[in-house]
Amino acid sequence: MIIVSLIGLKKSGKTTCVEALVREFKSRRMKVGTVKSMVHSNFTIDKEGKDTCRHQQAGADFVVSLSKDELAYIEKRPNRSRLDEFIRFIPEDTGILICEGLEDADPRIIRILVAKSSDFLAETFAVRGAQENVIALTGIIASETKENDKYPIFDCTVNEDVVALANRILENSI
């Protein structure tokens, strides 16, 4: 399985790039999964007073929630989960797992830095800690420049760039 993480500050273009890459890899007939990591969010599927929360409060180690067309796994964790802790939920036949915001030092992860502009590039590297395995830049920065001394820049709103970025991911997964 190829594991890619798009790392960047808020409103830099991460979701736009995830959507474009999902469409591109699906067009190549790959099984694609995504992970959305919400570092600073208080979002929870497990709301106080709801049945799933009550199951947890009763002492369940985990809860599986089934609805008409969704399945959710809920497990309370003392800290943010890392790749090794959630990869067990990813189907084995997944060809590519595209993670949005996953800040994990696991060497299996191919990283793409998503930046608002050249002015935010150093801050994005510093805040998100993405120094290893970065293969490209994308995001709003691509509408400003295509020039960077170290990394190619791809515009995920331009089909040719999405194809080129997908190819670069595949080339770096070997």
Image (cartoon, helix red, strand yellow):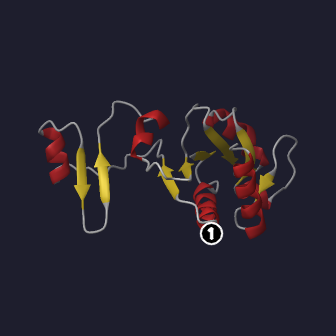
Residue 67, picture quadrant = bottom left
* Residue sitting at the far left: 58
Q: Mark 1 points at which residue?
A: 27
The C terminus - image quarter: top right
In this rendering, is residue 130 above or below 113?
A: above
Residue at left offset 15%, top offset 53% = 51
> Observer-nearest residue: 52 or 141?
52
Residue at left offset 39%, top offset 31% = 79
> Observer-nearest residue: 40 or 59?
59
Residue at left offset 62%, top offset 69% = 27
Q: Residues within 10 Å of mark 1 (few under 14, many from 20)?
A: few
Could you say where residue 55 lies in the image, as x and y percent from the top left?
15, 45
Left or right position of 69 against 173? left
Q: Which amino acid does label 1 sit on?
A: Ser
Could you say where residue 119 lies in the image, as x and y percent from the top left?
77, 45
Could you say where residue 98 lies in the image, as x and y percent from the top left?
56, 51
Res. 133 in view = yes
Q: How many labels does the image show?
A: 1
> Observer-nearest residue: 2 or 76?
2
* Residue sitting at the far front: 93
Left or right position of 152 against 98? right
In this rendering, is residue 133 above or below 156?
A: above
Left or right position of 89 against 108? left
> Observer-nearest residue: 143 or 110?
110
